[in-house]
Amino acid sequence: MVFPDVQRFFQARYPHVVAPFRRGRHWGAVSKSNHAVLRFRDPVYRSLRELAMSYLHEFRDADGRKTLRSYSSAFDLRQVDTDAWVTGEASCWDLHDRLAARRHHPLMTKAQARDLLDADACEREAAKVVDFPRP
């Protein structure tokens, strides 16, 4: 599943990718991120949309504006040679392009997006919790 975001997020136009999985009928996700809140999700979500919504408040730009607007359908990584994404021996840009080109589903209307509240000072401070701080 791919979460595209606005240009200011991470100062680039790269989507954030999570690896969804199912346990029974429920979805969870694993994500590699330095930010504590963008990681694992327990398999308690009934749909991919519900899982994507669990990331809504954490996807913010530097000014605290929420940036998550859509998500893609799941993508089976077994379709891709592991050298392209596991070992680092091949360029992963082809995989990036395939993920970014997938159909995306909106999470909210434009009116709902306009009404989103920015993160407050406490939320912005909490977002600074990282596994590997800059030296």
Image (cartoon, rainbow, N blue to C red):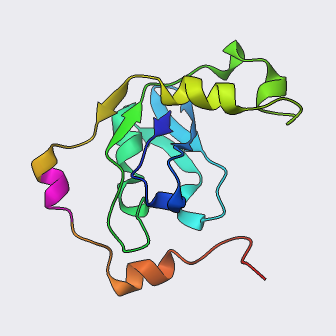
Total tally of numbered discs in the picture:
0
Residue reaching furthest top? Answer: 79
Q: Is residue 46 left or right of residue 116?
A: right
Q: Which residues are magenta?
A: 112-116
Residue at left offset 43%, top offset 62%: 58
Side of 35 where 27 appears, left or right: left
Identity of the residue drawn at 39% across and 52% down: 6
Magenta highlight: main SS: helix
Q: Establish if 91 lies above or below 51.
A: above
Is residue 56 in view from this perspective?
A: yes
Asked if residue 75 is positioned above or below residue 4 in the image, the reply reads above
Drawn side of residue 44 relative to residue 134, left or right: left
Residue at 43 percent of width and 42 percent of height: 4
Residue nearer the viewer, 10 or 59: 10
**Residue closest to the far left:** 111
Q: Could you tell me if residue 46 is visible in this image?
A: no
| Spot occupied by residue 132 in the image (x, y as percentages of width and height) | 74, 72
In the rendered structure, does residue 98 fall within the stretch colored magenta? no
**Residue 92 spot, x, y in % from top left:** 73, 32
The residue positioned 21% from the left and 43% from the top of the image is 108
Q: Residue 95 falls in which quadrant of the image?
A: top right
The image shows residue 28 at horizontal and vertical percentages of 52, 40
